[in-house]
Image (spheres, grey):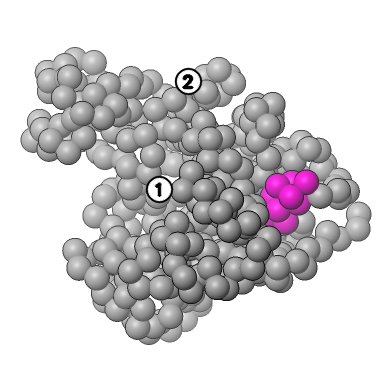
Protein backbone atom coordinates (compact mmCIF):
# COMPACT_ATOMS: atom_id res chain seq x y z
CA UNK A 1 0.00 0.00 0.00
CA UNK A 2 1.25 3.48 -0.85
CA UNK A 3 2.47 5.41 2.19
CA UNK A 4 0.13 8.22 3.22
CA UNK A 5 1.96 11.52 3.67
CA UNK A 6 0.54 14.80 4.86
CA UNK A 7 2.78 17.88 4.65
CA UNK A 8 0.26 20.72 4.96
CA UNK A 9 0.55 23.25 7.78
CA UNK A 10 -1.49 22.79 10.96
CA UNK A 11 -1.57 24.70 14.23
CA UNK A 12 -1.95 23.14 17.67
CA UNK A 13 -3.22 25.89 19.98
CA UNK A 14 -3.23 24.65 23.57
CA UNK A 15 -1.98 25.70 27.03
CA UNK A 16 0.87 23.21 26.58
CA UNK A 17 2.13 20.98 23.80
CA UNK A 18 3.05 17.87 25.78
CA UNK A 19 0.18 15.67 24.63
CA UNK A 20 1.08 16.15 20.95
CA UNK A 21 4.88 15.92 21.21
CA UNK A 22 5.73 13.28 18.62
CA UNK A 23 2.80 14.12 16.36
CA UNK A 24 5.18 16.00 14.06
CA UNK A 25 6.39 12.61 12.81
CA UNK A 26 3.00 12.15 11.15
CA UNK A 27 2.28 15.82 10.49
CA UNK A 28 5.61 17.50 9.67
CA UNK A 29 3.83 20.81 9.06
CA UNK A 30 2.48 20.93 12.64
CA UNK A 31 3.19 24.17 14.51
CA UNK A 32 2.65 24.72 18.23
CA UNK A 33 1.15 27.83 19.84
CA UNK A 34 1.52 27.02 23.53
CA UNK A 35 2.85 28.12 26.93
CA UNK A 36 1.58 31.69 27.26
CA UNK A 37 1.35 32.56 30.96
CA UNK A 38 -2.16 33.30 32.18
CA UNK A 39 -3.83 31.77 29.11
CA UNK A 40 -4.91 28.36 30.37
CA UNK A 41 -7.34 27.20 27.68
CA UNK A 42 -7.45 26.94 23.90
CA UNK A 43 -10.27 29.49 23.79
CA UNK A 44 -8.24 31.98 25.84
CA UNK A 45 -5.24 31.53 23.55
CA UNK A 46 -7.39 32.05 20.44
CA UNK A 47 -8.72 35.32 21.87
CA UNK A 48 -5.18 36.61 22.40
CA UNK A 49 -4.01 39.17 19.83
CA UNK A 50 -0.58 37.50 19.50
CA UNK A 51 -2.21 34.19 18.56
CA UNK A 52 -4.57 35.83 16.10
CA UNK A 53 -1.62 37.55 14.41
CA UNK A 54 0.06 34.15 13.90
CA UNK A 55 -3.00 32.45 12.41
CA UNK A 56 -3.83 33.40 8.82
CA UNK A 57 -7.36 33.15 7.47
CA UNK A 58 -8.02 29.54 6.56
CA UNK A 59 -5.50 28.22 9.13
CA UNK A 60 -6.16 24.59 10.09
CA UNK A 61 -6.43 24.19 13.86
CA UNK A 62 -5.85 20.74 15.32
CA UNK A 63 -7.88 20.52 18.53
CA UNK A 64 -7.63 18.34 21.60
CA UNK A 65 -11.15 19.14 22.73
CA UNK A 66 -13.82 21.03 20.74
CA UNK A 67 -16.03 23.63 22.42
CA UNK A 68 -18.74 26.07 21.26
CA UNK A 69 -16.53 29.07 22.13
CA UNK A 70 -13.73 27.75 19.91
CA UNK A 71 -16.20 27.16 17.07
CA UNK A 72 -17.46 30.73 17.39
CA UNK A 73 -13.92 32.15 17.25
CA UNK A 74 -13.08 29.99 14.23
CA UNK A 75 -16.12 31.27 12.31
CA UNK A 76 -15.29 34.85 13.27
CA UNK A 77 -11.69 34.63 12.04
CA UNK A 78 -12.06 32.21 9.14
CA UNK A 79 -10.06 29.35 10.68
CA UNK A 80 -10.77 25.70 9.85
CA UNK A 81 -11.14 23.33 12.79
CA UNK A 82 -9.75 19.82 12.37
CA UNK A 83 -12.17 18.32 14.86
CA UNK A 84 -15.62 16.86 15.17
CA UNK A 85 -18.30 19.32 16.28
CA UNK A 86 -18.62 20.12 19.97
CA UNK A 87 -22.19 18.81 19.80
CA UNK A 88 -21.07 15.39 18.55
CA UNK A 89 -18.20 15.36 21.03
CA UNK A 90 -20.55 15.98 23.94
CA UNK A 91 -22.93 13.28 22.77
CA UNK A 92 -20.27 10.62 23.27
CA UNK A 93 -18.17 12.17 26.06
CA UNK A 94 -21.05 12.94 28.44
CA UNK A 95 -20.31 10.73 31.44
CA UNK A 96 -23.93 10.83 32.59
CA UNK A 97 -25.26 9.17 29.44
CA UNK A 98 -22.38 7.12 27.99
CA UNK A 99 -23.24 4.10 30.16
CA UNK A 100 -26.60 3.93 28.42
CA UNK A 101 -24.82 4.31 25.07
CA UNK A 102 -22.53 1.37 25.86
CA UNK A 103 -25.49 -0.81 26.87
CA UNK A 104 -27.41 0.09 23.71
CA UNK A 105 -24.39 -0.96 21.63
CA UNK A 106 -24.23 -4.27 23.58
CA UNK A 107 -20.95 -3.44 25.30
CA UNK A 108 -20.42 -4.62 28.88
CA UNK A 109 -21.37 -1.73 31.17
CA UNK A 110 -21.24 -1.01 34.89
CA UNK A 111 -24.17 -0.44 37.23
CA UNK A 112 -24.86 3.27 37.68
CA UNK A 113 -27.51 5.84 38.46
CA UNK A 114 -27.72 9.56 37.78
CA UNK A 115 -28.81 11.72 40.72
CA UNK A 116 -28.19 15.05 42.39
CA UNK A 117 -26.13 14.33 45.53
CA UNK A 118 -28.26 16.69 47.63
CA UNK A 119 -31.26 14.47 46.95
CA UNK A 120 -29.62 11.45 48.59
CA UNK A 121 -28.73 10.86 52.23
CA UNK A 122 -25.71 8.78 53.15
CA UNK A 123 -28.16 6.05 54.20
CA UNK A 124 -29.66 6.12 50.69
CA UNK A 125 -26.18 5.73 49.23
CA UNK A 126 -25.35 2.77 51.46
CA UNK A 127 -28.60 1.01 50.58
CA UNK A 128 -28.42 1.56 46.82
CA UNK A 129 -24.70 1.69 46.03
CA UNK A 130 -22.78 0.20 48.95
CA UNK A 131 -20.06 1.53 51.21
CA UNK A 132 -17.66 2.65 48.49
CA UNK A 133 -18.61 4.43 45.28
CA UNK A 134 -17.24 6.40 42.34
CA UNK A 135 -18.88 9.71 41.47
CA UNK A 136 -18.41 11.38 38.08
CA UNK A 137 -19.48 14.81 36.89
CA UNK A 138 -20.75 15.32 33.35
CA UNK A 139 -17.36 16.32 31.97
CA UNK A 140 -13.78 16.07 33.12
CA UNK A 141 -10.28 15.29 31.89
CA UNK A 142 -7.76 12.72 33.17
CA UNK A 143 -9.93 11.93 36.18
CA UNK A 144 -10.48 15.55 37.23
CA UNK A 145 -14.26 15.06 37.41
CA UNK A 146 -14.15 11.73 39.27
CA UNK A 147 -14.31 11.19 43.03
CA UNK A 148 -13.86 8.12 45.24
CA UNK A 149 -16.28 8.23 48.18
CA UNK A 150 -16.15 5.79 51.10
CA UNK A 151 -17.34 7.76 54.15
CA UNK A 152 -20.22 9.96 55.21
CA UNK A 153 -17.90 12.95 55.67
CA UNK A 154 -16.68 12.64 52.08
CA UNK A 155 -20.28 12.37 50.88
CA UNK A 156 -21.21 15.53 52.76
CA UNK A 157 -18.28 17.38 51.18
CA UNK A 158 -19.47 16.22 47.76
CA UNK A 159 -22.99 17.47 48.53
CA UNK A 160 -21.56 20.91 49.39
CA UNK A 161 -19.51 21.10 46.17
CA UNK A 162 -21.69 19.22 43.65
CA UNK A 163 -25.03 18.82 45.39
CA UNK A 164 -27.10 20.80 42.86
CA UNK A 165 -25.69 19.05 39.78
CA UNK A 166 -26.61 15.71 38.31
CA UNK A 167 -23.77 13.23 38.75
CA UNK A 168 -23.11 9.63 37.82
CA UNK A 169 -22.95 7.33 40.86
CA UNK A 170 -21.46 3.83 40.60
CA UNK A 171 -20.58 1.15 43.15
CA UNK A 172 -16.79 0.85 43.36
CA UNK A 173 -15.53 -2.27 41.55
CA UNK A 174 -12.00 -3.58 42.08
CA UNK A 175 -9.93 -3.95 38.94
CA UNK A 176 -7.56 -2.32 36.48
CA UNK A 177 -8.48 0.37 33.99
CA UNK A 178 -7.28 -0.41 30.48
CA UNK A 179 -7.54 2.04 27.63
CA UNK A 180 -7.10 2.08 23.86
CA UNK A 181 -6.90 4.45 20.93
CA UNK A 182 -9.06 4.04 17.84
CA UNK A 183 -10.05 5.88 14.69
CA UNK A 184 -13.33 5.88 12.79
CA UNK A 185 -12.75 6.02 9.03
CA UNK A 186 -15.05 5.59 6.07
CA UNK A 187 -13.30 2.23 5.53
CA UNK A 188 -14.18 1.06 9.06
CA UNK A 189 -12.83 1.42 12.60
CA UNK A 190 -9.18 0.77 13.51
CA UNK A 191 -8.49 -0.17 17.13
CA UNK A 192 -5.20 -0.34 19.04
CA UNK A 193 -4.27 -3.16 21.40
CA UNK A 194 -5.35 -2.14 24.94
CA UNK A 195 -2.78 -0.68 27.34
CA UNK A 196 -2.91 -0.17 31.10
CA UNK A 197 -3.92 3.21 32.49
CA UNK A 198 -1.66 4.27 35.38
CA UNK A 199 -3.35 5.89 38.37
CA UNK A 200 -2.37 7.21 41.80
CA UNK A 201 1.40 7.27 41.30
CA UNK A 202 3.05 9.25 44.15
CA UNK A 203 5.45 11.13 41.85
CA UNK A 204 2.68 12.14 39.44
CA UNK A 205 1.70 15.18 41.54
CA UNK A 206 -1.99 14.28 41.82
CA UNK A 207 -3.86 13.78 45.09
CA UNK A 208 -6.97 12.21 43.51
CA UNK A 209 -6.57 8.38 43.37
CA UNK A 210 -8.60 8.35 40.14
CA UNK A 211 -6.36 10.82 38.30
CA UNK A 212 -4.73 9.35 35.20
CA UNK A 213 -0.95 9.51 35.58
CA UNK A 214 0.10 7.88 32.32
CA UNK A 215 0.01 4.59 30.45
CA UNK A 216 1.86 1.28 30.31
CA UNK A 217 1.78 -0.90 27.20
CA UNK A 218 1.75 -3.92 29.47
CA UNK A 219 1.42 -7.46 28.19
CA UNK A 220 -2.22 -8.58 27.99
CA UNK A 221 -3.55 -12.02 27.10
CA UNK A 222 -4.59 -12.20 23.44
CA UNK A 223 -8.12 -13.47 24.08
CA UNK A 224 -8.89 -10.63 26.49
CA UNK A 225 -7.22 -8.02 24.27
CA UNK A 226 -9.14 -9.07 21.16
CA UNK A 227 -12.43 -9.23 23.07
CA UNK A 228 -11.95 -5.63 24.23
CA UNK A 229 -10.95 -4.59 20.71
CA UNK A 230 -13.99 -6.20 19.08
CA UNK A 231 -16.26 -4.29 21.48
CA UNK A 232 -14.39 -1.07 20.63
CA UNK A 233 -14.71 -1.76 16.90
CA UNK A 234 -18.47 -2.27 17.30
CA UNK A 235 -18.77 0.98 19.26
CA UNK A 236 -16.75 2.78 16.58
CA UNK A 237 -19.26 1.53 14.02
CA UNK A 238 -22.05 3.00 16.17
CA UNK A 239 -20.19 6.32 16.21
CA UNK A 240 -19.79 6.11 12.41
CA UNK A 241 -23.56 5.78 12.02
CA UNK A 242 -23.88 9.00 14.04
CA UNK A 243 -21.55 10.71 11.50
CA UNK A 244 -18.53 10.62 13.80
CA UNK A 245 -15.10 10.51 12.12
CA UNK A 246 -11.61 10.46 13.56
CA UNK A 247 -9.73 9.57 16.74
CA UNK A 248 -11.38 8.36 19.93
CA UNK A 249 -10.39 6.53 23.11
CA UNK A 250 -12.24 4.03 25.30
CA UNK A 251 -11.59 3.06 28.92
CA UNK A 252 -12.61 -0.34 30.27
CA UNK A 253 -12.48 -1.91 33.75
CA UNK A 254 -10.92 -5.38 33.85
CA UNK A 255 -10.82 -7.77 36.81
CA UNK A 256 -8.40 -10.61 36.22
CA UNK A 257 -9.33 -11.91 32.76
CA UNK A 258 -12.91 -10.58 32.91
CA UNK A 259 -14.28 -7.38 31.40
CA UNK A 260 -16.39 -5.75 34.13
CA UNK A 261 -17.58 -2.87 31.98
CA UNK A 262 -16.64 0.01 29.72
CA UNK A 263 -16.24 3.23 31.70
CA UNK A 264 -16.03 6.18 29.35
CA UNK A 265 -15.44 7.37 25.80
CA UNK A 266 -13.09 10.18 24.81
CA UNK A 267 -14.34 11.24 21.34
CA UNK A 268 -11.34 13.42 20.44
CA UNK A 269 -7.56 13.34 20.53
CA UNK A 270 -6.34 11.83 23.80
CA UNK A 271 -3.42 12.58 26.12
CA UNK A 272 -1.44 9.71 24.57
CA UNK A 273 -1.83 10.98 20.98
CA UNK A 274 1.72 12.31 20.54
CA UNK A 275 3.57 9.34 22.01
CA UNK A 276 1.25 6.82 20.33
CA UNK A 277 1.80 8.52 16.97
CA UNK A 278 5.55 8.32 17.42
CA UNK A 279 5.31 4.60 18.23
CA UNK A 280 3.21 4.00 15.12
CA UNK A 281 5.61 5.84 12.82
CA UNK A 282 8.60 3.98 14.27
CA UNK A 283 6.74 0.67 13.69
CA UNK A 284 5.97 1.51 10.06
CA UNK A 285 2.23 1.88 10.63
CA UNK A 286 -0.13 4.41 9.12
CA UNK A 287 -0.70 6.76 12.09
CA UNK A 288 -4.23 7.05 13.40
CA UNK A 289 -3.53 10.79 13.62
CA UNK A 290 -2.98 10.98 9.87
CA UNK A 291 -6.27 9.17 9.27
CA UNK A 292 -7.99 11.46 11.79
CA UNK A 293 -6.90 14.52 9.80
CA UNK A 294 -7.73 13.00 6.40
CA UNK A 295 -11.23 12.04 7.53
CA UNK A 296 -12.02 15.40 9.11
CA UNK A 297 -10.79 17.28 6.05
CA UNK A 298 -12.76 15.00 3.73
CA UNK A 299 -9.69 13.96 1.71
CA UNK A 300 -9.54 11.00 -0.67
CA UNK A 301 -7.03 8.31 0.30
CA UNK A 302 -6.49 4.56 0.06
CA UNK A 303 -6.27 2.29 3.11
CA UNK A 304 -5.87 -1.45 3.57
CA UNK A 305 -7.94 -1.67 6.76
CA UNK A 306 -7.19 -5.34 7.48
CA UNK A 307 -3.45 -4.87 7.04
CA UNK A 308 -3.35 -1.83 9.32
CA UNK A 309 -5.44 -3.63 11.93
CA UNK A 310 -3.06 -6.59 11.88
CA UNK A 311 -0.22 -4.19 12.65
CA UNK A 312 -2.13 -2.60 15.52
CA UNK A 313 -2.89 -6.04 16.98
CA UNK A 314 0.80 -6.43 17.85
CA UNK A 315 0.84 -3.60 20.36
CA UNK A 316 3.90 -1.72 21.63
CA UNK A 317 6.40 -1.61 24.48
CA UNK A 318 6.27 1.74 26.19
CA UNK A 319 5.68 3.24 29.64
CA UNK A 320 5.08 6.91 30.34
CA UNK A 321 3.92 9.05 33.21
CA UNK A 322 2.71 12.65 33.36
CA UNK A 323 4.43 14.89 35.91
CA UNK A 324 2.10 17.55 37.31
CA UNK A 325 2.32 20.47 39.70
CA UNK A 326 0.97 18.83 42.85
CA UNK A 327 1.08 21.97 44.99
CA UNK A 328 -1.70 24.46 45.62
CA UNK A 329 0.39 27.29 44.14
CA UNK A 330 1.93 27.89 40.70
CA UNK A 331 5.47 26.61 40.22
CA UNK A 332 8.18 27.31 37.67
CA UNK A 333 8.82 24.48 35.23
CA UNK A 334 12.10 22.87 36.35
CA UNK A 335 15.00 21.76 34.18
CA UNK A 336 14.53 18.10 33.22
CA UNK A 337 16.55 15.77 35.45
CA UNK A 338 18.30 13.04 33.42
CA UNK A 339 17.68 9.44 34.43
CA UNK A 340 19.18 6.38 32.77
CA UNK A 341 16.81 4.81 30.27
CA UNK A 342 14.15 7.53 30.68
CA UNK A 343 13.39 10.24 28.13
CA UNK A 344 12.13 13.49 29.65
CA UNK A 345 9.82 15.56 27.43
CA UNK A 346 9.45 18.88 29.21
CA UNK A 347 7.77 22.21 28.74
CA UNK A 348 10.13 25.17 28.48
CA UNK A 349 12.05 25.54 31.78
CA UNK A 350 10.94 28.65 33.65
CA UNK A 351 7.35 28.48 32.35
CA UNK A 352 4.79 29.15 35.12
CA UNK A 353 2.82 25.93 35.82
CA UNK A 354 -0.60 26.36 37.50
CA UNK A 355 -1.74 23.83 40.15
CA UNK A 356 -2.66 20.46 38.64
CA UNK A 357 -1.14 21.25 35.23
CA UNK A 358 1.45 18.92 33.64
CA UNK A 359 5.00 20.11 33.12
CA UNK A 360 6.72 17.00 31.71
CA UNK A 361 6.33 13.47 30.35
CA UNK A 362 8.74 10.73 31.41
CA UNK A 363 8.97 7.96 28.79
CA UNK A 364 10.76 4.61 28.76
CA UNK A 365 10.47 1.09 27.35
CA UNK A 366 9.81 -0.42 30.79
CA UNK A 367 8.39 0.63 34.18
CA UNK A 368 10.48 2.99 36.30
CA UNK A 369 10.15 5.14 39.38
CA UNK A 370 11.19 8.73 39.93
CA UNK A 371 12.71 10.35 42.96
CA UNK A 372 10.39 12.27 45.33
CA UNK A 373 11.96 15.54 44.19
CA UNK A 374 9.78 15.33 41.07
Magenta stretch holds residue 290: yes
Residue 301 makes an appearance in the image: yes
Height in image: 242 above or below 200? above
Q: Marks 1/2: CA distance?
A: 20 Å
The answer to which of 220 and 342 lies nearer the viewer is 342
- Disc 2 secondary structure class: helix
Q: Is residue 98 left or right of residue 6?
A: left
Q: Position of residue 179 (x, y in %)?
A: 52, 44
Q: Is residue 332 left or right of residue 297?
A: left
Residue 313 makes an appearance in the image: no
Residue 78 image label = none
Magenta stretch holds residue 299: no
The span shown in magenta is 289-298
Q: Position of residue 141 (x, y in %)?
A: 40, 48
- Disc 1 secondary structure class: loop
Which residue has dot 2 on it? 100
Height in image: 25 above or below 291? below
Which residue has dot 1 on it? 141
SS majority, magenta? helix
Q: Residues within 10 Å of mark 2 (few under 14, many from 20)?
A: some
Could you tell me which residue is drawn at 32 percent across and 75 percent down? 352
Compare marks 1 and 2 and give the one earlier in the sequence: 2
Could you tell me which residue is drawn at 32 percent across and 42 percent down? 145
Task: Point out the image quarter for the N terminus.
Answer: bottom right
Amino acid sequence: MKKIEFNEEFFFVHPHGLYLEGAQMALPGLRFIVDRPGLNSTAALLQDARTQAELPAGARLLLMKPAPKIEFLAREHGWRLVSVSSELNRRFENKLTIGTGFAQANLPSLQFEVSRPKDLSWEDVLERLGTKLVVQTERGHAGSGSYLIDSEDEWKRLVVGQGDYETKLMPFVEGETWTLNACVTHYGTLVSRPFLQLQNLPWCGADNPLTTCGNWHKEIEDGLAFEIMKHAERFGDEMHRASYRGWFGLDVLVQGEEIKGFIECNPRLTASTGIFTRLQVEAGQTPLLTLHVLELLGCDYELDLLLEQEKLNQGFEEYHIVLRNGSAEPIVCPEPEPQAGVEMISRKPGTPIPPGEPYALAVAKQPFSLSPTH
